[in-house]
Image (tube, coloured by chain):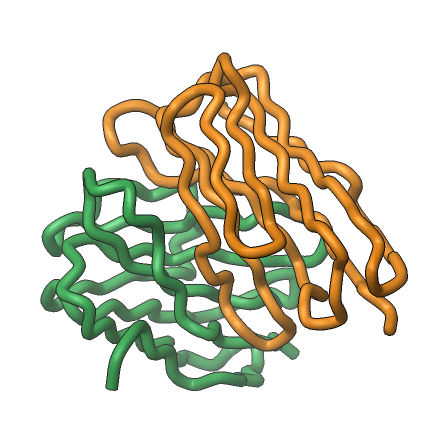
Amino acid sequence: ETGVTQTPRHLVMGMTNKKSLKCEQHLGHNAMYWYKQSAKKPLELMFVYNFKEQTENNSVPSRFSPECPNSSHLFLHLHTLQPEDSALYLCASSQVATKGGYTFGSGTRLTVV
Amino acid sequence: TQLLEQSPQFLSIQEGENLTVYCNSSSVFSSLQWYRQEPGEGPVLLVTVVTGGEVKKLKRLTFQFGDARKDSSLHITAAQPGDTGLYLCAGEGSGNTPLVFGKGTRLSVIA
């Protein structure tokens, strides 16, 4: 399989649940990202990993916890979320310093009830 | 914080019409990218522009980077229903910082 793959595509969870989003890239890229996409807002950068090291955390609440076990896999662990966290969560990868752009996955549509 | 303003926010046109969407900022970017996103999918890269004044063409789409590298435009000639989608511009600052995205222009082309 090529490109960036995200699972699950859809997720409905209660505010007391714990779940994880998974992202996998088969492009040999050295950077991976989590973005949040909500209606009427620009894509919001959440976390950045360069060579498996977290280089950015844009003041994201601790109920979101990223994990990058290797350069091909990225997880977003979720716990005690709020209804306003409902959004499309997009994973992307890139090869740093090449101007080659980001390759995005199809996203996980998350609904918190 | 670098911000990108896109206009118009929404655009609905008839098949065959021409259109231009804009991406503006007060900040200078080392490169600027355009993406198209269709419902239920992630954004897909259309083009990257790097040099001030650069013009790139992709079939019926023409992309221009402003001379000062603060703004960009996307012109579509003879729009088709397949062009429907959310068009996002994204700027890269200096030092390989992560992309900053605009809110997007939602285009609907009616047959």
Q: In which quarter of the image is the C terminus of chain B?
A: bottom right
Picture coordinates of residue A99, whole percent (x, y): 28, 41
Picture coordinates of residue A12, whole percent (x, y): 57, 85
Query: Which one is in front, B29 or A90?
Result: B29
Which chain is orange in the rendering? B
Picture coordinates of residue A2, whole percent (x, y): 26, 79
Task: Give the answer, above or below, for where B56 lies relative to A39.
Answer: above
> For residue B20, what is the image quadrant?
top right
Residue at 57% from the left image edge and 24% from the top image edge: B71
Residue at 84% from the left image edge and 64% from the top image edge: B15
- Answer left or right for B69 relative to A28: right
Task: Give the answer, above or below, for where B104 lies relative to B67.
Answer: below
Count of all numbered marks drawn on residues in the image:
0
Picture coordinates of residue B75, whole percent (x, y): 67, 42
Query: Which one is in front, A75 or A26?
Result: A26
Query: Which one is in front, B3 or B83?
Result: B83
Task: Give the answer, above or below, for where A81 lies relative to B9.
Answer: below
Query: Which one is in front, A16 or A55?
Result: A55
> For residue A75, what is the image quadrant?
bottom left
Q: Chain A is drawn in which colour?
A: green
